[in-house]
Structure formats: C-alpha cells, structure tokens
Amino acid sequence: MAESNPAVAVKRSASAGLSAISAEAIEGLTELDELERVYQQLCDEEKQVESELEALISQQGNIETKMLALQRMGPNLQLIEGDATQLSGMITFTCSLAENVSSKVRQLDLAKNRLYQAIQRADDILDLKFCTDGVQTALRNEDYEQAAAHVHRYLSLDQSVIELSRQGGESSAVDASLALLQEAEQRLKALVKERLDQAIADGDLAQVERFFKIFPLLGLHDQGLARFAQYLCAQLAKKAEENLLLAVGGELGERRAALIFADTLTLLLEGIARIVETHQPIVETYYGPGRLYTLIKHLQVECDRQAEKVVDKFIQQRDYQNKFQIVQSSMMRSMSTEKIEPRELDPVLLEVTVMNSRAELYLRFLRRRITADFEVGDATAPKSTVQEHQQSLEKLLTHCLLSRNMQELIGYYIPMEEYYMRESVNKAVAMDTYEKGQLTSSMVDDCFYIVKKCISRALSSSSIDCLCAMINHATSVLESDFREVLYNKLRQGFPATTLQDIQRGVSSAVSLMQTSLQQGKFNTLGIESAEDAKASFLVTLNNVEVCSENIITLKKNLESDCSKLFSQGFGSGEQAQAKIDSCLSDLVSTSSKFKDLLQEGLTELNNTAIKPQVKPWISNFLSISHNIEEDEFNEYEANDPWVQQFIVNLEQLMAEFKAGLSPVIYDTLTSLMTSLISLEMEKTVLKCTFSRLGGLQFDKELRSLVTYLTTVTTWTIRDKFARLTQMATILNLERVTEILDYWGPNSGPLTWRLTPAEVRQVLALRIDFRSEDIKRLRL
Amino acid sequence: MQEMANGKMHFSAPVSKDRIISKFPKWYTPQACLQMKDHWHTRVKTACQDRTTRNVGMKMSKVVVVGDLYVGKTCLINRFCKDMFDRDYKATIGVDFEIERFELSGVPYSLQIWDTAGQEKFKCIASTYYRGAQVIIIVFDLADIRTLEHTRQWLQEAMRENDPGSCFIFLVGTKRDLLSSAECHRTERDAVKMASEMQAEFWSVSSKTGENVREFFFRVAALAFEGSMLRDLEGAGSHSHIGAGDLIRIDQGTAEEPKAKSVKKLSCC
C-alpha cells in the first residue's frame, strides 16, 4: 500500500497541473528512502515548471508585435468596405445594361428569322410557279423524270406555306398554278402507273426500272415497291416453273437425281437471294433505307407459292407421306404387314435435310439483310418502331409458308429417322458377329456408326429442334434398347466349368430357361458350347465398356459440330445453345449407366467364375499344418506346400480373362479378385492354429502372394491386404505382451485395421500363447 | 468431371428471394390432389437439415408441359418465369425451355421446364422430351371443353415414354378470368373428375391476372423436390457411389436384380 500510494498521487498532480505531491502523501511517509525519492521527484518537477515558464515569457515579445500590427490594420478595413459597395453598384448597373442590349438582340434575331421565312416563302411561291411551268413542259416532252422532280419539289413544299400564300394578294394566281400542278400530279401518277404496268407486262427491265425510280418522287413508295415486286415475282415464277418442269421430267439417271427437289428448291431460293442482291442498291438509292422489308415481303409470297409447288411435287414423287405412314404404323405395331427397309429411306431422308438446310440458309440471309437495312433506316427512330419492325420481321420469317412447309417436312422426317435408327440398330444386333482375337463384336461399332450417321444427318438439316429431337431419340435407343440387349446377354451368365461349380451351373441354367420361356422363345444360346458362351460373356463386357467410352466421344464430337453451326449464325442465340446442352448432357449421362452395367457384369463374373475356383484353393491352406517345428519348417522351405501352387492356379485362371478382356476391365476384375482373396484368406486363417514357426511360415506365404498380386494389377493392393498383414504380424510375435510394442501409443505410422477383439482372436490362434495372458492384455 | 464442377459453380449464385419456399405449399382442391399432407415428409426434413445434403450440388427435375394448341402453355410459363403476359398469340415452334431456380427448406433446387408446341406437326419434336420427366403438366382451356377432353390423349402419349407412377401429373385449367364463377364452377367439376381418373392434381389458374400461377408452380416444385429427395434416400440404401460423378455401383445381388429406377442426374454444363 505504502509503495503504491505515491505513484497514484504523482499521477493525480500531473493531470491537475498542480505542483507537488499532495501534502498528506508526504506526511504519511516514514521511510527515508521514500522521502528521498519523493524529494527528488519534487525537484524534477520544479525544474520542469521553470523551463515551461521561461518558454512562455520568451513568447511575450512576439505576441505584442502581432497585436500592434492588428491595431494598425483597422482604418484600412473601413476603406475596403467603401470600395466594395461601389463595385457592387457598378455591377448592378452593367447587368441591367446587358439585359437591355440582349433583349434588343433577341428582337433582331426574331426579325431575321421572319425575314428568312419570308424569303423562303417567296422562293417557294416562285418554285411553285416554276414547277407549274416545268411540269407542263416536261409532260409535253414526255420527260417524266423531270416532271416527277417538279412534283416532288411541290410535294416537299410546306403545305401551310401554300395555304398562306393563297390568302395573300396574289391568291387567284397561286390558286390557278396550284390547280394546274395538282392536275399535273394526278396525270403524272396515272401515267407513270400505266407505263410501269405496261413495262411489266412487256417484261422490259430498263423501262420497269425507269418508272420504278419515279414512284418515290411522287410519294408512292409502297405502290412502287409492290409493282416492282410484282415484276420480279413474275420473272421468278417463270424461272421456277421451268426448273420444276425440268426436275420432274428430268432423266432419273442423272447424277444428282436423288437430290433433284432439293436442288430445285436451292435454285429457287438462290434466285431470290440474287434478286435481292441485285436490286437492293436501287431500292436503297431511290426509296431510302428501311424499305427492303416491304419488297421482300412481296417477294416472299411468290417464294412461298413456288416452294410449296416444289415441296408438293417432292411429297408426291418421293411417296413421302406414304412412306411416313408405313413407318408410323410399323412403329406402332411391331408386327406389321408392310415394312420399309431402312436403307430405302436413306435418299429421301438426306433430301429432306438438304432442303431444310437450304431454307434455313435462305431465311438467315433474309434476316441479315433486312436487319441491316432496318438498322440504317431506324437509326433515329423511337424504340417502339424498332421493336415493331423487329416483330414484323420475326413474323415474316417464322410464319411464312416456306417455314411452315419445312416444319411439316421435318415433322415427318424425325419419326422416319427414328425408325431408320431403331431398325438399323436392331439389324446390327441381329447380325452381330465376333471374330476370334478381337475384343469387341461388330454390333457396337455398327450401332454407333448408325447413331452417329442419324444424328449427323439431323445436324445437316441446320434445324436445332430437329437435331435435339434426334439426340433424344439416340439417348433413348442407347439407354433402353441397346443397353437392354447387352444386359440380357450378361444375364445369361458366365458358364461354370469345374466340378465345384455344378450346383451354380444348374441354377443358372434354370434361370436361363425361365427367361427364355418368359420371352416366349427358346434361345439357341442355351445349347451353345460353354466355350462360346464364355467368349460371348467376355465380349459383351468389352462391348459395354466401349459403349460407355463411345458415348462420351460422341458427345464431344457433337459439341464441336454444334459450336461450328452456332458460329455460322444458325440457331437463335442462347435458347438454342441451352437446348443442345441439355440434350447432350442427357446423352452423356447414359455413359455412366453402361459403366454401372459393366460393374454388375464384372461382379457376376467374379462370383461365378473366380470365386468358386479360388475358394477351394484357399481352403487347401487348412490342410497344411502351421503348427510346425524346425524340421517341418525346413521341409516347407525346400518344398513349398501351398502358396506356389496357388499362384500358378491363379495365373492359369486369369490367363483366359487377360486374353479376352480389355486391359481396363481386366484390371478391374483382378482388383475384384484380390479383394475376394484377401477376404477368403482372412476367414481361412482364423480357422487355423499356429506355432511360432507356423506364424513365420504364414508371413512368408503372405509376402509371396502379395508380391505376385502386385505384379498383376496396377491398383494398389497393400491396402486390401492390410488386415491380413497385421494378422501375420501378430502371429509372428515372440510373446503375447510384445503386441503392446505395436499397439496404441507405440503404433507409430501403422494404423490398425483390426479391432482389439480381433487382435485377441488372432493371438488365440497361436497355440503357445496362454489364454490368460491374452485376457490380461490391456488393449 | 471438370465441366460438371464448373457447372455447379455457375449455379451456386443465391436464389432470388421470391423463389424461397419454406412452408409446404397446399393443394388447390382436396377433391383432386396428389397429397393431402401440409408439411414436409419427415425423412426429407431431416435430410434437408443435414449439411451433407446441401452440398450434394445442384438438383434438377424435368418438367414437361403439354396440351392442345392455344390453351396457354407458354403464357402460363411466361407469367411465372418472367412475370409477363403477352396478349398476342405466338405459336411455339418445336420446344422452348426455362430453368427456374428455387430454394426449398434451405436446399437449392431447379426445375427445368420444357414448353412444348401444341401443334400436331411439332409433336414429333416435343414427344422426344417426354422421357425421364418427373412432372407432367397437362394444360387445358377452361373456356373450351374440348381441350379438356383431349387431356386424356396427352397423358397417354406422355406416359408412353415413362414408367407408370414415376411422375407427378398435374391437370391445369387456364384462362379462368374469361369465365363467370358459375361457368367456372361447372367446368372445374368436370376437370376434377378427369383429374381423379388420371390420378392427377387439378389446378385452375389465370395467366392474365396471375391468379394461382405462383401457388401452382410452388406446389409443383415442392412435390418434385420431395419426390426426388425420397428417391435418392431410398437409392442410397441399395447401392453406394464411389467418387462424385462416376457412379460405380457396388452391386449387392446378382445381375438379375430389377433395373434400378433411373435417377436423373442432369449436369448443368
């Protein structure tokens, strides 16, 4: 207490700014040391205060000079105030002056504008007069361009100006010239229409173009475009009819005969594209941008008409509808009287996809052109107009008869392509052959060739919906139909051969019979030789694996094909991409179903072919005594009693699978086998008894086995044998208590896979370990 | 695998607030509904609270919307997904689709809604999407009784590609705003009868006013979610998965065991 008090007191005094340590604190001090320390403190404080005071005093002079300067400034401030007031007055004055001047300028400006307007009007009236005279002369000289130019000038005059002029002094004169002009305008319009119609009837392109250019001058944009389109349509129709006639009557031996309707359609669409290309500049120059849509709208009517003719002829000549109906009815009922050979559909399916891709290409061309034209025309238009234009373009393209016709063709195409795919796959399955030495049989390659072909054909139609539909069909065919085929083959099982297997063989034969009976037909596979059945099972396993790989490859290839399609501008943006992505991810998910099937098949193989063989070999271990002394141990050293034979047996057993299975599957199978061995060994070892040397023998045997198995598989097997290795360690102990050197805190990097109970169980296998010692162990 | 992981990342943005469903949505009418209970299945509830379920990744169910042309399938979807209603009729070409993301009991979940064209000529395209659907929504026009009669046909076609009992079926009458309450009542009675024949749940909606649309889709999402969770929970018992996407199955019985119901795992890439 006595020590802490002064410190507190010092702090307080410092914060209060008062000198010294409180008097009571000093009075309370009794020790000399303390007193001296406080005294010293007080002295320090005094020095500090003195230096502070000196600093303050030294500043005094400085402050006094500053005060003096401030006092001197007083009168100056009064002067400044006066000046400021004067300045403000001057600014106010200037301001009002400026206002006055500017209002006069404004008035002048107004007057100037009025003057300009007056001049403009005078000019207009003069123009009007000039136009009136000009039109008359031009019409007399049949110079329609000149006449139209005059009328255009008149039409572009401000109508209100003309009205005002009529109210003026010269009303009668203006009226007269106006009447004349209007009359001339009507006459010119009628004349130009007549002449254009005449030119169209004559098919005189030069004249058609001449009068077509006059229409916009007279404000008759739409009529001009309509008439011009009429001319173009007539040309188009003539050409198209010729082409179609040629196509229908053409020699069927021609090289492209199989695609003649697709070619005819192509000619038609290319013709229109060429027309658009040639005449777009005229329309743009004389009618201004944003008019292309109107022209194409008229052309599309003719295009629709001609395309429909081609499509109708196609349907008729190729017997398209009929083929579709046959296909549909044979898909509804599997037993149909009439059936089409899938190969027969090849040309017609190809032709439809070509037709559709041409139509898509054409519509894409129109979209590009019209959009670009609208963009120029609508540069300053309000948003609503832009939207309206976009909608009308969309409507034109998606609802034109050409589109609808193509949609219908594709509508028939998809079920026919589906039929083609299913039938061909069925055929590939039925004609499945397998050559010795090959890992897979023909049907896998054939089946994927067909699926790829069908999807590629759908892709070549450039229709995203069509492509997606075929991807979905392919997914269904692979996942249900084809997987089912492989699944049924695996269900027939791997035939048993050894005596030990007879029981299992019988039961699998019974189940085979049952399934055959359920399917209503007797499967000839049942009486095939066992060797063939074995090979068939292994080939099927390989097939399943290849399928799973092929599906992934197919998806990857399709993805890159689609991105090519999209980069060419097909499919309208995100929606199409998302649709494709979704369908492709459905497709690729079937790959894992094949993987599941493979796993099931391997388990089956492991259970039927490996387990029944391996089990007795392992149980042979029981007949070899491990309760041995030095002599027997040496005897075993010279003549291996079990493990070498076991390894030889395994080698023989697996040789067949190594030859018949793909490396990946074989590896999985050996992995299953090693799991089986470790499990069975464990069970067997627990049934034996061991001496000290017996434990050593077992350790040696296990090492040989693990070394062998490590060489045959790429999977790590140490883990699978961890429990057995630990059992060997236990069986190899000198004393029961030695286990504690490895257990619990002494286990080091070793992780025990055996429970304490199991450790006791294994210890008990050693005949030389006393059960009391084992019981006494604290694990 | 890499792609799948990326896909999941892409979808892990938070679900918008108006798509969070915490309370189990109710039926429209008890006379024709798929479930009467008003709470989550207990097993699903526990699974939702389990952290591991939340980390499984994006779950998605496939919903297919079918029905006659001009009954308002696209309008129904647009009202829910984009909250808009377009008076002009625009025929759907082929199929369209939307992905709608939800959060149910704290677990993210998506519906992939396929909007099919009602026109006959597009049926061949639309029908390829029926397979593997968890939900089939059959739409008809409350003001046109013939479209209700056709729903039976639509159901038959959609179920041809699916195992019976594998999907939830909804019967939805649209354009409710066009009918007087008396007319509406009469048609609904017929529809309820039809729905119970189909073992479907009946809903009556208006896409124009938005009446019942949100409630309906919430109900769809909840039932589909619960269904797929239950199936996963059952599935997990019969086989274990090694690795995230490889789905190697450790088989329990022989190869003869019935085909496990295909558990759709849509990757989102």
Image (tube, coloured by chain):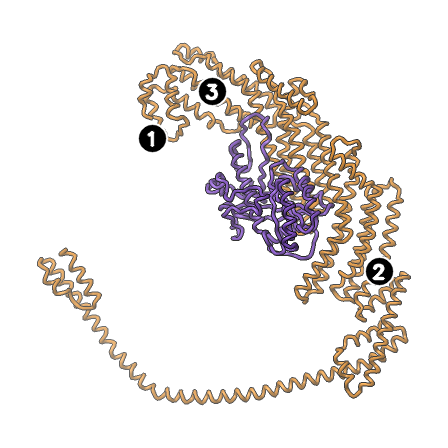
Q: Mark 1 or 2 closer to N-term?
A: 2
Which residue is label 1 attached to? A745
Type of the residue with mark 3: Met
Type of the residue with mark 2: Gln
Looking at the image, which residue is at 83% across and 85% down? A173
Marks 1/2: CA distance? 100 Å
Say which element carries label 2: helix
Same subunit, tags 1 and 2: yes
**Label drawn at residue A681:** 3
Res A649 → quadrant: top right
Chain displayed in purple: B
Looking at the image, which residue is at 71% across and 64% down? A376
Say which element carries label 3: helix
Q: In the picture, which quadrant includes the C terminus of chain A?
A: top left
Of residues A708 and B51, the one nearer the viewer is: B51
Which residue is label 2 attached to? A230
Res A410 → quadrant: top right
Q: Mark 3 or 2 closer to N-term?
A: 2
Say which element carries label 1: helix
| Residue A772 screen position, x and y as percent | 31, 18
Residue A468 in sight:
no
Q: Nearer the viewer, mark 1 or mark 2?
A: 2
For disc 2, the neighbor class at 10 Å (few under 14, some 14 to 19, many from 20) is some
Q: Is residue B229 above or below residue B188?
A: above
